[in-house]
Image (cartoon, rainbow, N blue to C red):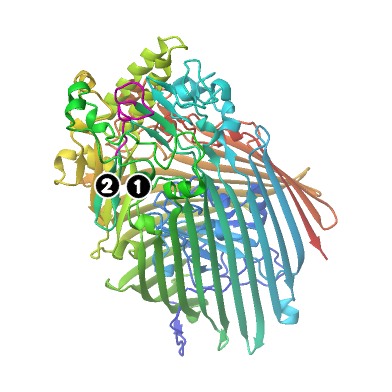
Amino acid sequence: MNKIALKTGVIAVALTLGSSQVVLAQDDSAKPIEKVVITGSNIKRIDAETATPVSILRREDINRLGVNSVREVIDTLTSSTGSLSDIGGSNSFAGGASSASLRNLGKQSTLILLNSRRVAPYALADYNEVFTNLDALPLDAIERIEVLRNGGSAIYGSDAVAGVINIITRDDFQGVQARGSYEQSVANEQFKTKTASLTAGWGDYSKDGYNILANVEVFHRDNVIWRDVLDDINPAYGQKFSAVAPKSGLMFGNRGAPSTYSYPGNLIGQGPVAGCATLSAAGLCVFDRFAHFEAVPKADRANLLLSGKLNVGNGIESYSELLYSKTKTTYTGAPGNYGSANTDAIWGDPRTGLGKTFGYRFLSPDSPLNTTGAPLELRYRYADAPDQSPNDSDQYRLLTGLRGTLAGNYDWDTAVGVMGSKTKSRHNGSISDSGFKALVGDYTKTLAGDPNCEANFPGYCQYTAADPNFFNHGYKLGQTNSPDVLRQLFPEQGYDGKITQYFIDGKISGELGRIGDRAIGIAVGGEVRHEKFNITPTENLRDGDIVGYGDASANASRTSEAVFAEVNLPVTQKLELIGAARVDKFPGFDAHVSPKVAARFEATPSLLLRATFEGGFRAPNLTESATSTKFAFVTAQDPKRCNQANALADDLRKAANALPGSDPNQALLLARADTVAQNECSAGTASIVSNNPNLKPEVTHSATAGFVLEPVKGTSLSLDYWHIERKDEIGLKSVDDLLAAEADQAPGVINRAPLTQDKTFTAAERAKYGVSDGPLVSTTGKFENVSRTKTSGVDVSGSSRFDTPYGRLDLGVDATYLLSLKNFSSTLNNYGDNLAGRYGYSKLVANLNAALRTGQFTNSLRLVYNSKTSLNTDFFDNNYTQEGCNKLGWSSDECRIKAYGRLDYNVSYSGIKDLTLSLNLRNVTNRRPPVDLREFNFDGSGVIPQNYADVQGRMVRVTAEYKFR
């Protein structure tokens, strides 16, 4: 029987989360084997393979990927799932930032660490989601990235639900290194990205007792407009969507149908407004909207990292670190349009909590612009509105600390620091409600009830402006309007966000005793953190003055405390048991305990078995629990009107195609077809949401079980099954879920306008297509612990290294197979369908890598694979089932996203002294991504392409790195 000997005098420094910056144990057996800390534990160990599955991307691996940012690195992980990107963030509450999401659990469930400590969240919440901006982290300073592929709340606390991404920067670097890269598309040179960095290090810590690291990195990405690349889109889209059909672009290009919502405009039935320079064959004024649709926004970033450490003697090391970043993403927006037949815009007034409606009006028969004597439809484009929307953000983290060894056996680490971010997000080009009434006219006053109008034009009067000078006041159609007028009608609006966190943390770890000749490891510690979060909308948003725009604000602070303990118990020579627990206390909630148990069993020298079970949590953030009301828009498909709208749109297109191109009604019918489908199948619906002070934390239970096998030296294979269940999820009942069970909702949850205010269908069309419900207006609710999610899958990793006649060959594979993903539905009072293999959730994601080192050359190939998916999502999604696709005229082959594989190639040469040159080809075979008709139809409203990779094609990236001696 093993004798257990315990050591005394283990006194915890009650502060945690500060694991030392570490390096991996060296492969060279001539060097001493060093104990290291691996993400997911605070106990140093020799073995690289722990009970917890951890993936490691080293610097050389990252260089071979040919990436330009940390976000792009994270996207290469097979466990990484879709999340916010600054490229697609123009319509989010947190534009200009990028986030990470693991296991399809969202950006609030993946914890991002820099050198094992948290970094400040982005200063704007994406509605209610608070996250770390990956664009604010340096790429070239990275030594490696460790990815904990299961929950980590027992070690790191709140948010570490789906996993932890720990970015480790260079340590003890000496010399000066300059690096620059340039990336461009072969097919369309508009896609360009440039990066440059300078890294310098002074002092050999082992000899001089100090080391200082400085890294500066800059990033620039050009913007891309769809008009410049549209003709290269997959022809399959042009076969399904008339807006991008061949020859649809008229005088502007081969593809991209111009809009009759134009500048200086059209008076339907009367003719174009005087001064139009682009007339269609039908004599209507047209506008090239694709010249203003943006595929990729412009971005500029600068990151600074300063770190240093000093041996102060007696085994104590002092260290400090400063991270500062400045990012700017500038979005170019298409000018808005005005159409008398447009669906009314719905939004809200945060001051009153009531909804507001902006009505589009016909011109009065008495208007000087109207010569028809009847209500006249206007189609206009605000081409003179400002179109640049900048998002500027600053982020920082400053910390200093001490670490050392106590009594020769216990490593301790404590630090104090401050971190924060500040963001100014501005949007230009949207209409001011008050400015419109002052400069264009009061749309609330109509000819409804006017005896003359009702007698001659029944059905039009309630939509016709009473003011004869509507659009003939301060703002003039198609004329030069003064800067003052434009500022009043299109004022700048947006948000200022600021978040500040102060923390003190520390831990102590070491050997508590022994079982036989194996050490019992222990770590204890704690943390105190104070955070302040302020999101302030501009005054015009607070007043509900910007038509169609929501509002989100927060002004709150809190202090949280945590303590933790972890023990590694070597039960036998082959079996280790690990236990950990962390207690977090947030104000307003009971203390939460996150436990973890794990086991590691060396069945044979070449086979390791491992398993974990952990409880995790996410505390409600300050935007969810602080007093607030949020007005936002969600895109929804109305199940009571969408299919009917698509049927009407199809009939309108058939009628249009039967007319000669010179007939002005052809363009009008096609334009109405687009409007009808958009109004009912992808229109914005107002969502009015309040906070809930009675929220509970989200809690999770996760488990893993797997093995690591090394059949021969230099070759290893690991397989890990994972399962995560999350309950008490904070959120809202989805609009789709609500609409799927509309009859079961309480009054006021789903709000519809009466049929008398239906602008999509005429009375005759309602009878023909079976429309009996009015248009969707809004939904109301509050944040709730509303749902649950459970997901499971298998991770497989393998690597092999061996010598060939041509050099050393490294082979690697990483794959994630999604077995199940289910979201709970309050409507069903049960889980919905298994989403594995459904839209957005490939069952299999895999990377295969091969690298051959021959002399001064390293050639590498990487194959990226995503399995096929259907187009429909959960049980409520009837629009993209096979039946729904049939109604849209899509075949069974088109009612899915095909499997996709992309081949990348990288070659580097280091034969010139101190210089390394690299060439990376992404998408060597120039293969298009698979056609996604749902994305084009729903997100793009059947008009705007959504996937810039479709026209990006093969990308070439060249990199030069020079080391100064």
Tell me the number on the disc at residue 632. Answer: none
Left/right placement of residue 946 relative to residue 646 reads right
State the residue at coordinates (37%, 76%): 559
Q: Which residues are magenta?
A: 359-376
What crowding class fits label 2: few (fewer than 14 Cα within 10 Å), some (14-19), or many (20 or more)? some
SS category of the residue bearing label 1: helix
State the residue at coordinates (29%, 34%): 465
Q: Is residue 696 above or below residue 782?
A: below
**Disc 1 versus disc 2: distance between alpha carbons?**
10 Å
Is residue 365 part of the magenta span, yes or no? yes
> Badge 2 is on which residue?
356
What crowding class fits label 1: few (fewer than 14 Cα within 10 Å), some (14-19), or many (20 or more)? many
Where is residue 519? Give x, y as percent: 50, 77
Q: Nearer the viewer, residue 239 or 930?
A: 239
Viewer can see residue 828 = no
Where is residue 740? Give x, y as percent: 23, 37
Residue type highlighted by circle 2: Lys
> Badge 1 is on which residue?
433
Q: Nearer the viewer, residue 794 or 750?
A: 750
Where is residue 604? Give x, y as percent: 52, 58
Say which label, 1 or 2, has the lower sequence index: 2
Residue type highlighted by circle 1: Asp
Type of secondary structure dominating the magenta stretch: loop
Q: Nearer the viewer, residue 381 or 143?
A: 381
Is residue 606 part of the magenta span, yes or no? no
